[in-house]
Image (cartoon, helix red, strand yellow):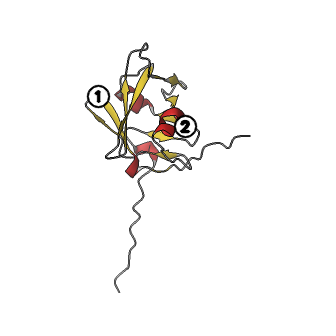
């Protein structure tokens, strides 16, 4: 008798992703060590938007750039975070729960995050008290 398999198509765990990036409902964007190093371990980044494809771009910029977002190192593992709420509000990006971007990639020095391919993160953002 032939089996009737159902394919599990959700992306794999974040630990195997090359460039792990997640976004929380609070507007905090988290970068893994690999993702942070891929954009040259910046102290500041600029956020780019492509309306046609609903894609976010992150690029390293000098500290004195007026529209830059400050990047904060988290711990000894090399993770980093920054607060992108202004950007999220401006582009009306809906983030109901923590999401990650399994297709994150570097294109011409820009870390590309495609909103169409975001998936719920297995880790949930902490609830505000």
Residue 35 in the image: x percent, y percent?
Answer: 39, 32
Can you name the residue that lies furthest to the top here? 64
Tell me if residue 115 comes above or below residue 47 in the rendering.
Answer: below
Q: Which residue is mark 1?
A: 109
Query: Label 2 vs label 1: CA separation?
Result: 23 Å
Residue 58 in the image: x percent, y percent?
Answer: 38, 31
Which quarter shows the N terminus?
bottom left
Q: Secondary structure at mark 2?
A: loop
Residue 75 in the image: x percent, y percent?
Answer: 55, 25
Question: In this orientation, which residue lies closer to the viewer: 3 or 96?
Answer: 96
Which quarter shows the C terminus?
top right
Q: Residue at coordinates 42% horizontally, 24% vertically from top-left?
A: 45
Residue 8 in the image: x percent, y percent?
Answer: 41, 64
Q: How many marks?
A: 2
Q: Which residue is mark 2?
A: 27
Tell me if residue 115 comes above or below residue 31 in the rendering.
Answer: below
Question: Which of label 2 and label 1 is nearer to you?
Answer: 2
Instruction: Specify which label sits upstream in the sequence, 2 or 1.
Output: 2
- Residue 59 circle label: none
State which quadrant residue 57 falls in: top left
Q: Residue at coordinates 36% horizontally, 22% vertically from top-left?
A: 40
Q: Secondary structure at mark 1?
A: loop
Q: Residue at coordinates 56% horizontally, 49% vertically from top-left?
A: 97
Q: Residue at coordinates 60% horizontally, 43% vertically from top-left?
A: 125
């Amino acid at each position: 008798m032939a089996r009737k398999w159902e394919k599990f198509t959700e992306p794999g765990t974040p630990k195997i992703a090359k460039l792990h990036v997640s976004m929380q409902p609070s507007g905090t964007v988290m970068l893994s060590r690999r993702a942070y190093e891929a954009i040259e371990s910046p102290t500041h980044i600029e956020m780019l938007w492509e309306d046609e494809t609903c894609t976010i771009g992150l690029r390293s910029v000098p500290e004195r750039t007026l529209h830059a977002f400050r990047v904060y190192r988290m711990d000894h593992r090399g993770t980093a975070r920054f607060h992108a709420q202004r950007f999220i509000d401006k582009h009306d990006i809906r983030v109901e729960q923590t999401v990650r971007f399994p297709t994150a990639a570097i294109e011409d020095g820009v870390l590309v995050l495609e909103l169409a391919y975001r998936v719920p993160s297995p880790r949930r953002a902490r609830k505000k008290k």
